[in-house]
Image (cartoon, helix red, strand yellow):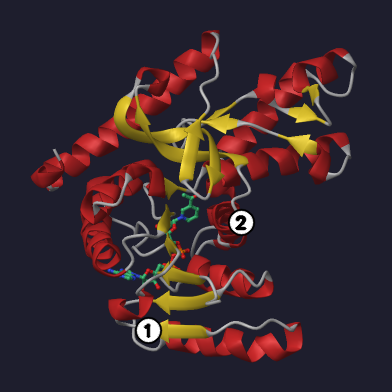
């Protein structure tokens, strides 16, 4: 039986970490692709040389040619450029849109049956463009953001309550950005909702509000510390969890940027919602009822994603 094949488009900080995690978890053979010559080859060889020590068997290859991703079961996309000083959001959008166009074609021509996970920012707009450019079914093209945002929320809550991260579940909806919507009502410690924990005196509403805000600013906090890049360990772990859910048909309930066809009153756009991931890709979108401020915040988040989509259409009218 042939091993599963995982293609990583972009061999930067996240791409390299993805390759290492895929190896450590023995998810399959790995192909690292990048336009930079030597980078994917060097990282692939370095990881392959760790395999005897760590005891995993996987072929880890680096490439600058899309042919090498042929037949991949999973493709994870991190290709793109980060915003540099003096660059507007539209400049970044324009550059990364072009990257999504190249990547979309590469996937369409070489791995049309893959489950595709996009990480490139601005996430919700880029995954939408990638799906259009690749022409793959929308249930097989998904964006990673919610797992990471929820993981940050879970970590901060576990720290607050001094309990295991394993016992904290948390829920974050909406677009990936300042307008994401961490849902306190649906977040729990071993099944006890956060509002009940406030009543039990474990924390206060004011503390929870601080934690929610820290979650929203989670990406910026890491950028502020690193100064020369953005988070990559937790983003890679999050995407690997999604890949594993698909490859092992685990039917995990995970928040992802998924293509909506009427759910939440939205049609034809990607936004972060709870989903079920199994062998069919996004097998189900879970529609929860939002209340009061949650609804307003979700709407703000949706408006911000729409703004990015409109900017993409302005740059690339074929997306309209
Ligand atoms: P980085 O280390 O810069 O890696 C990006 C790689 O993409 C580089 O190796 C480039 O050479 C490569 N690249 C550029 N253009 C192309 C192309 N046309 N084809 C193939 N490869 C190309 O970045 P990173 O790994 O730290 O981050 C990657 C992306 O993820 C960025 O857009 C980040 O903003 C984004 N990101 C998203 C999240 C989310 O939660 C959604 C979190 C963290 C980072």
Instruction: Estimate the x, y position of residue 205 in percent, counting from the top left.
Output: 74, 18
Residue projecting furthest to the front: 1
Label 1 crowd bin: few (<14), some (14–19), many (20+), radius 10 Å: many
Q: Is mark 2 within 8 Å of ligand 1?
A: no
Q: Which residue occupies 57% across, 70% down?
A: 17
- 164 w.r.t. 111: above or below: above
Q: Nearer the viewer, residue 190 or 263?
A: 263
State the separation of the CA atoms marked 2 and 1. Answer: 27 Å
Q: Nearer the viewer, residue 293 or 319?
A: 319
- Mark 2 neighbour class, 10 Å CA radius: few under 14, some 14 to 19, many 20 or more: few
Report x, y in % for residue 257.
44, 40
Question: Residue beneath label 2, please?
Answer: 248
Tag 1 residue: 63
**Where does residue 28 sit, x and y in percent of width and height?**
57, 73
User: Residue at coordinates 59% horizontally, 88% vertically from top-left?
Assistant: 48
The quadrant of the rendered image in which ligand 1 is seen is bottom left
Q: Is residue 54 left or right of residue 317?
A: right
Query: How many numbered marks, from 0 up?
Result: 2
Are the residues tagged 2 and 1 within 8 Å (C-beta)? no
Question: Is the residue 98 above or below the residue 206 in the image?
Answer: below
- Image quadrant in which you'd find residue 253: top right
Instruction: Look at the image and tell me whether residue 58 can be seen.
Output: yes
Q: Which mark is residue 82?
A: none
Instruction: Residue at the far top: name it.
Output: 292
**Residue 291 image position (x, y, % from top left):** 55, 10
Quadrant holding the C terminus: top left
Seen from the viewer's position, the closer of residues 254 and 18 is 254
Point 62% across, 58% down: residue: 237
Residue 252, placed above or below residue 65: above
């Amino acid at each position: 039986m042939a091993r599963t094949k995982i293609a990583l488009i972009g061999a930067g900080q996240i791409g390299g970490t993805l390759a290492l995690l895929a190896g450590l978890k023995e998810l399959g053979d790995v192909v690292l692709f990048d336009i930079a010559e030597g980078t994917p080859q060097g990282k692939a060889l370095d990881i392959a040389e760790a395999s005897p020590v760590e005891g995993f068997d996987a072929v880890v290859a680096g490439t600058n040619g899309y042919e090498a991703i042929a037949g991949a079961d999973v493709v994870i996309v991190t290709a793109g450029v980060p915003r540099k000083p003096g660059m507007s959001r539209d400049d970044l959008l324009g550059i990364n849109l072009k990257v999504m166009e190249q990547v979309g074609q590469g996937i369409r021509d070489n791995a049309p049956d893959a489950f595709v996970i996009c990480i490139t920012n601005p996430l919700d707009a880029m995954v939408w463009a990638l799906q259009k450019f690749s022409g793959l079914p929308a249930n097989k093209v998904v964006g990673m953001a919610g797992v990471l945002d929820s993981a940050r929320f879970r970590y901060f809550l576990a720290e607050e309550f001094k309990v295991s991260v394993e016992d904290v579940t948390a829920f974050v909806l909406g677009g990936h950005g300042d307008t994401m919507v961490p849902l306190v009502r649906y977040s729990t410690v071993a099944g006890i909702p956060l509002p009940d924990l406030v009543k039990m005196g474990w924390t206060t509403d004011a503390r929870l509000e601080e934690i929610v805000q820290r979650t929203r600013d989670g990406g910026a906090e890491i950028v502020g510390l690193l100064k020369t890049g953005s988070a990559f360990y937790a983003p890679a772990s999050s995407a690997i969890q999604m890949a594993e859910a698909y490859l092992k048909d685990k039917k995990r309930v995970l928040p992802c940027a998924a293509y909506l066809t009427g759910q939440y009153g939205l049609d034809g756009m990607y936004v972060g919602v709870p989903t079920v991931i199994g062998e069919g890709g996004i097998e189900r979108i879970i529609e929860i009822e939002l209340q009061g401020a949650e609804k307003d915040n979700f709407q703000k988040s949706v408006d911000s994603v729409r703004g990015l989509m409109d900017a993409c259409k302005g740059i690339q009218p074929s997306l309209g």
